[in-house]
Amino acid sequence: MNKDLLKLYPHDLWENFANLCDCPHPSKHEDAAIKWMKQWAKDHKVKVEQDKTGNLLFTVPATKGMEKCTPVILQGHTDMVPQADDPKFDFLKNPIEPIIDKGWVRANRTTLGADNGVGVCAALACVTTPGVKHGPLEILVTVDEETGMTGAFGLKKGFVKGKILINLDSETEGEMYVGCAGGMDANFERKYTTMPTPADMKGFQLTVTGLHGGHSGMDINLGRANANKIAVRFLTKAVKEYGACVASVCGGSLRNAIPREAMSVLAVPAKKATAFKTFTKKFETMVKAEFSATEENMSVTVKSVDTPKKVIRTKAQNQFLNMIFAIPNGVLRMSDSMENLVETSNNVAAIKAENGVMSAICLLRSSVDSAKDALGDRMTAIAELAECGIELTGAYPGWKPNMESPILKTCQKVYKKKFNQEPKIMAIHAGLECGLFGSCYPDWDMVSFGPTIEHPHSPVERVNIDSVGKFFDFLVEVLANVPKK
């Protein structure tokens, strides 16, 4: 545990977060974190139960005098996105190392897990921090939000009794979120065969590195480069102009993270090797100029390696490269109804061609369900042209804003009174679990807010310390002002 965190305000929140960082909890591997939270419940004599999906529900009686308030659910998710600059870092075994750095908390070369660890730890801190007043309270902690919203999909009617849900998974203090994008995965896959590498070829390894990456919803509008798209753009040119043959491709790993790195092994005719190396340098200069404002550390390099014995057969190779090249990436449309909100986007999250199988994973997002469906149809058309199989899976609905929400009005009133300024009312181009909750519990009144977190889903993720204190104070004040039943 980093004991320096215990000196920060609010104490109980940061103590919880320090303990959580000691528990490995990447998506689908949250057992250590769940064990810690169950022990926390035992230590503080809080009732906790777990559903079949793995979600935890803590039930806390109202504080004295608050018994007639409308029951509230505080909600966050257990899992974190595992991204590291150190390829040897093992998220299944190693604790996260939080570091206090000039008013922020970040991790040592990995994602921090402030998304959504700070929200979960704030909810627990509401139970133990002296002086916090609240009505009947439930804390719902879902599992596997980041890789498929498994916990939200698995939530059953009747498990939760509250009527107001406060989601603590937003990432800019002072903003209240009342809507979010829906999403869907596009999973491409086809088999391929190889052929012996033609004679008199030299082997090379392409690497695209140094990109910022980031959250494929929150950061998709920042103009950052996608390592997979850069790599395939390079390979397409190398095949057409230098007779390159591709042996393997691998880039990206997580569906909701903009890919930061990609790699390919290829073979180039020996007589064109010198020209190919020159092309590589020109290509790097070109794309670095294109992304000079967003990717100052981009690197596109090739190095000589042993010539691969086999390469992908030409037709399959070209179909795969053309398919990835053609798939749209980034912002596809901005919202007409809310300024500066992305409506529809796509993230070419992961690509791979090795061991006889080619694949790609994309995460489609849109706040308009018909636009999301149309983008899925577009992906299907591209796949069919490339003679590639495709499955559209994991679709989840967006969360339609309700500007007349009673809890929203309470939040606005409390924020204005406490901080003497109006909060911003927003929708988010990311998949908050509220959309799924609304389909299971349609009568819930919902709002989402949180502290300021920058660069989630990347190794430079960080959370602003002052904003955490402000966020917690606001949450406490909202709980004290929840309307009566």
Image (cartoon, rainbow, N blue to C red):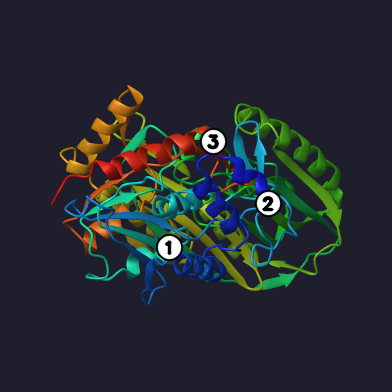
Query: Which residue is more in the foreground, 419 or 184?
Result: 419
x and y percent of residue 53 in the render?
A: 39, 74
**Front in this rendered view, residue 75 or 305:** 75
Of pointers 2 and 3, the one earlier in the residue sequence: 2
Kind of residue sitting beneath label 1 = Gly
Residue at 65% in and 67% down:
313
Q: What residue is at 62 percent from the left and 61 percent from the top? A: 317
CA distance for labels 1 and 3: 27 Å
Please give the residue where the numbered disc 2 appears in the rendered image: 97
Few, some or many C-alpha atoms within 10 Å of disc 3 (few <14, some 14-19, many ≥20)? Answer: many
Looking at the image, tell me whether mark 1 or mark 3 is earlier in sequence order.
1
Look at mark 1 in the image and give the residue it sits on: 148
The amino acid on which the numbered mark 2 sits, given as a three-letter code, is Glu
Q: CA distance from mark 2 to mark 3?
A: 16 Å
Callout 2: SS: loop
Label 3 sits on what residue type?
Asn
401 lies above or below 81: above
How many marks overall?
A: 3
Give the CA separation, mark 2 to mark 1.
26 Å
Residue at 23% over, 59% down = 162
User: Would you say residue 387 is visible in this rendering?
Assistant: no
